């Protein structure tokens, strides 16, 4: 098991390197001078050159990349151009909020998706299957930022049941596990859950439908096993693949919540990202994307290892 | 000799058209797919011919006619926050929305197919370089990658096209590579190579015909996501710039109106939803019509 983990880890390193290169290049493809935002309008050529040297922008690109990576290794992601605060602190605070939202959405989506998918797989080509299939197609087709707005219209504007903005009363950013805060979580989490419900249901439907037609299921019935016990066998067979899909979905939820966070003013990484974009705060943009992408890479690694731990067939391949 | 060859080719041609007419027959018999196709064709035609439909000017606002509700006299679907006719803006909005929503997949289909076929056919170092680069892009969730590139490049139609094309090249390349290396391992490729055909000739004559339709089917399944992402970029303010009518951008600017006229402000999003739903169902329909085993 450990050797499998180490082998996978070694495969991840070049990907992580590539991710860091892309994040580094993001700032390079941005039009305009990254320093214009903080440079005084009447700066002389010498002052500009001094500033450029101070930020290391006068060195060749590979050297700049080396310096950036070396700082990164020490947890230094540079300073936000807009606020002057260290990027690392801002990003990790925001990522915690995003993680809270992503995990809440996963807690809603995965059980519902599994249940619906199992129903559809069990009653394949029956009316129930068609209903579930329709739900999952609608789930993956809906632009979730629009769904968020529709839910706000229904539950905030029309019914007045739930708040539509922020992560706590009065726009507070400090999370607490009480009703006053948790009611802020409901609408964004439900909105974010819709796409993974569709994807998980679709996956589990295909998996359980296929497994149910396999010979061993017939054999289990033939030896007199009860329906419920047979389903437990089916579930175990489907678990590894289903878990890997869900693990990736959790990664997507974190990286893909940007639009939803914007709709609900949720103070997470997506919200930070859109602020960074509009203030042309490139170090902050770079740092946020790097952290989210590396989280996704780590998630992939965890999924692979867990999958291999559950299903010995995978390790053998 | 020539006669034999021609008749041989003739046989192949018949089998070929037989397959495609079978696909067409199955498609026509599938009501859901046909309804979706009809809706999409109507949306595209109305977007193309918008100037000749006798609509109001989508750019002309009116201070006194702002946020008129759906069903107002002279404004069938009401007016937006600047008093512009919603029906006109929704139909004109289809132009940019559909263009930016579909074009990246078309571009990525060509670029990704070329890269994937090269990687799959050449194998070895070429394959490693192309596919490991593709792996790196897979480390980004598609939404994140699109927003990262668009965010860095800034708003604009060309920038949106560029960032979305970059997002969809890696998945298409991966599928193209997998299909091509499958075909590459078949005996008739070896036979063609043994007969002295050059790599380009083998690819042109023997490979492309066998790999393009699976790649194409896969690409169609990406159109719905691309549509949602493209409108999402405009919704975030890093896609199409105002005052151009575009569904994502309209959804964004109308958000301020949800307390005044909630359902009016939800209309542009409904258009995105219907389009992406039809694209998904159409793609499913084409897939099952083309793949007899399914």
Image (cartoon, rainbow, N blue to C red):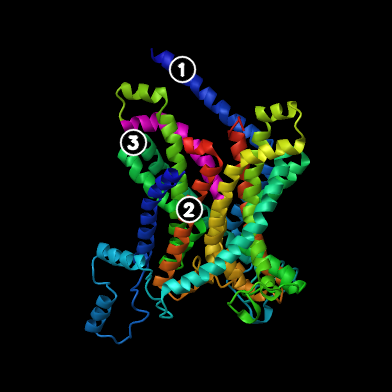
* Circle 1: element type: helix
Q: Which quadrant of the structure image shows residue A71?
A: bottom left
Q: Are marks 3 and 1 on the same chain?
A: yes
The nearer-to-camera label among 2 and 3 is 3
Q: Quadrant of the C terminus of chain B?
A: top right
Task: For label 2, count other residues whose C-alpha is less than 10 Å away and answer few (under 14), some (14-19) or many (20+).
Answer: many
Q: Quadrant of the N terminus of chain B?
A: top left
What residue is disc 1 on? B8
What residue is disc 2 on? B104
Query: At which x and y percent is residue A200?
Result: 63, 49
What secondary structure prevails in the magenta region? Answer: helix
| Nearest to the observer: residue B6 or residue A174 | A174
Query: At which x and y percent is residue B139?
Result: 45, 54
Is residue B202 shown in magenta? yes
Q: Residue at x 47, y 70 (%)?
A: A91
Determine whether label 1 and label 2 are within 8 Å by CB. no
Rendered image: mark on residue B216:
none
List the single residue furthest toward the bottom: A42
Left/right of residue A158 with respect to residue A144 in the rendered view: right
The nearer-to-camera label among 3 and 1 is 3
Res B55 seen here: no
Rendered image: mark on residue B122:
3
Res B211 seen here: yes
Query: At which x and y percent is residue B271?
Result: 64, 59
Left/right of residue B189 with respect to residue B39 in the rendered view: left
């Amino acid at each position: 098991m450990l050797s499998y983990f180490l082998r996978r880890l070694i495969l991840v390193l070049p990907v992580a390197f590539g991710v860091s290169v892309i994040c580094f290049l993001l700032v390079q493809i941005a039009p305009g001078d990254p320093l214009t935002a903080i440079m005084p309008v009447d700066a002389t050529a010498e002052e500009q050159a001094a500033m450029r040297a101070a930020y290391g922008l006068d060195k060749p690109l590979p050297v700049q990349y080396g310096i950036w990576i070396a700082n990164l290794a020490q947890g230094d992601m540079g300073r936000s151009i807009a606020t002057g605060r260290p990027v690392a602190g801002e990003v990790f605070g925001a990522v915690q909020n995003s993680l809270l939202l992503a995990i809440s959405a996963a807690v809603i989506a995965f059980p519902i998706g599994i249940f619906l998918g199992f129903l559809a797989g069990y009653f394949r080509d029956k009316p129930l299957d068609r209903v579930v299939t329709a739900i999952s197609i609608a789930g993956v087709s809906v632009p979730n930022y629009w769904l968020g707005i529709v839910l706000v219209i229904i539950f905030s504007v029309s019914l007045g049941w739930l708040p539509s903005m922020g992560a706590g009363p009065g726009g507070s950013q400090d999370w607490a596990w009480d009703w006053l805060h948790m009611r802020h979580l409901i609408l964004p989490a439900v909105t974010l859950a819709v796409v993974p419900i569709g994807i998980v249901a679709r996956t589990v439907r295909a998996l359980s439908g296929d497994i149910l037609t396999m010979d061993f299921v017939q054999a289990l019935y033939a030896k007199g096993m009860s329906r419920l016990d047979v389903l437990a066998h089916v579930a175990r067979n489907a678990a590894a693949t289903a878990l890997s899909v869900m693990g990736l979905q959790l990664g997507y939820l974190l990286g893909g919540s940007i639009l939803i966070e914007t709709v609900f003013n949720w103070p997470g990484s997506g919200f930070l990202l859109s602020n960074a974009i509009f203030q042309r705060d490139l170090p902050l943009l770079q740092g946020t994307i790097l952290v989210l992408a590396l989280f996704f890479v780590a998630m992939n690694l965890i999924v692979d290892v867990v999958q291999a731990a559950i299903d010995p067939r995978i390790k053998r391949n | 000799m020539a006669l034999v060859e021609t008749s041989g080719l003739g046989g192949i041609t018949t089998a070929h058209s037989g397959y495609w007419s079978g696909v067409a027959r199955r498609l026509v018999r599938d009501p859901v797919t046909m309804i979706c196709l009809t809706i999409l064709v109507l949306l595209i035609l109305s977007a193309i011919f918008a100037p000749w439909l006798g609509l109001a000017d989508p750019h002309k606002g009116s201070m006194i006619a702002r946020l008129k509700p759906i069903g107002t006299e002279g404004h069938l679907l009401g007016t937006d926050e600047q008093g512009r006719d919603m029906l006109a803006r929704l139909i004109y909005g289809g132009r940019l929305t559909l263009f930016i929503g579909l074009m990246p997949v078309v571009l990525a289909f060509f670029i990704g197919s070329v890269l994937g076929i090269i990687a799959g056919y050449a194998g070895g170092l070429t394959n490693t370089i192309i596919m490991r680069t593709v792996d790196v892009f897979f480390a980004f969730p598609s939404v994140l990658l699109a927003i990262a590139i668009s965010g860095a490049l800034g708003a604009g139609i060309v920038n949106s096209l560029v960032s979305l094309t970059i997002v969809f090249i890696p998945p298409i390349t991966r599928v193209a590579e997998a299909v091509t290396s499958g075909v590459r391992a078949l005996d008739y490729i070896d036979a063609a190579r043994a007969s002295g055909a050059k790599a380009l000739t083998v690819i042109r004559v023997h490979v492309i015909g066998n790999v393009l339709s699976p790649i194409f089917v896969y690409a169609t399944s990406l159109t719905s996501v691309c549509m949602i992402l493209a409108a999402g970029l405009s919704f975030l303010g890093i896609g199409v710039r105002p005052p151009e009518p575009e569904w994502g951008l309209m959804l964004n600017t109308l958000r301020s109106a949800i307390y005044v006229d909630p359902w009016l402000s939800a209309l542009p999003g409904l258009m995105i939803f219907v389009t992406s739903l039809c694209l998904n169902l159409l793609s499913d329909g084409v897939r099952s019509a083309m793949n007899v085993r399914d």
